[in-house]
Amino acid sequence: MASFVLFLGLGHDSPLLDIGLALGLFGLSQGLSKAPSIALIMNAAPPDAKNDLAGILSLCRSLSIALGVLFFETIFSEAIPAGISQNDTHIAAAITHPRELAAGFTGDFVFGILASLLAVGFMIAARNKPPA
């Protein structure tokens, strides 16, 4: 949660140290939470279903990575103004237009928040549903 607060304070003119700190804290939190979460899920499964569950977890992980890239790139590319050449992929070209590119990052951030809230809503709904 702290990394999201740091991300909210970032702008197109933020120092690289602030950006690196927010990204580092986010990466650390992801690294510390993944293994316990997967262990919790695997330990809750019956022994004869653990192989199937491991495959489903792997599929979900791969699918979420692919969809994350797809949605990020789609939203980000849509926000790039026509004045910036989409054929020029050099870093120097991107650095010269930080304000224009900020709209793409903002759109991606808002989409990420909405997707996270939707996921939490699904988890709450599933938790309150009586087992079949």
Image (spheres, grey):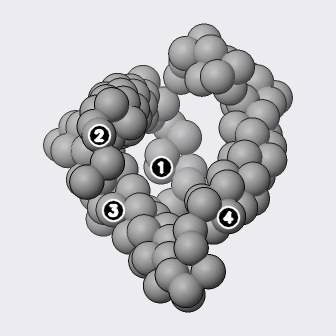
User: In the shown orientation, is residue 132 left or right of residue 127?
Assistant: left
Verify CB contact (< 8 Å) between mark 3 and mark 1.
no
| Callout 1 secondary element | helix
Neighbor class of circle 4 (other Cα within 10 Å; few <14, some 14-19, many 20+) is few
Q: What's the distance in space between the residues labelled 3 and 4, CA to CA?
A: 27 Å
Q: Which residue is mark 3?
A: 67
Q: Which residue is mark 1?
A: 93
Q: What's the distance in space between the residues labelled 3 and 2, CA to CA?
A: 30 Å
Which residue shows up at 67% across the image and 55% down it?
Answer: 40
Viewer-nearest of labels 3 and 1? 3
Amino acid type for the residue under numbered disc 1: Ala
Amino acid type for the residue under numbered disc 4: Asn
| Callout 4 secondary element | helix
Q: What's the distance in space between the residues labelled 2 and 1, CA to CA?
A: 55 Å
| Callout 3 secondary element | helix
Viewer-nearest of labels 2 and 4? 2
Q: In the rendering, which numbered label is found on residue 37?
A: none
Q: Which residue is mark 2?
A: 130
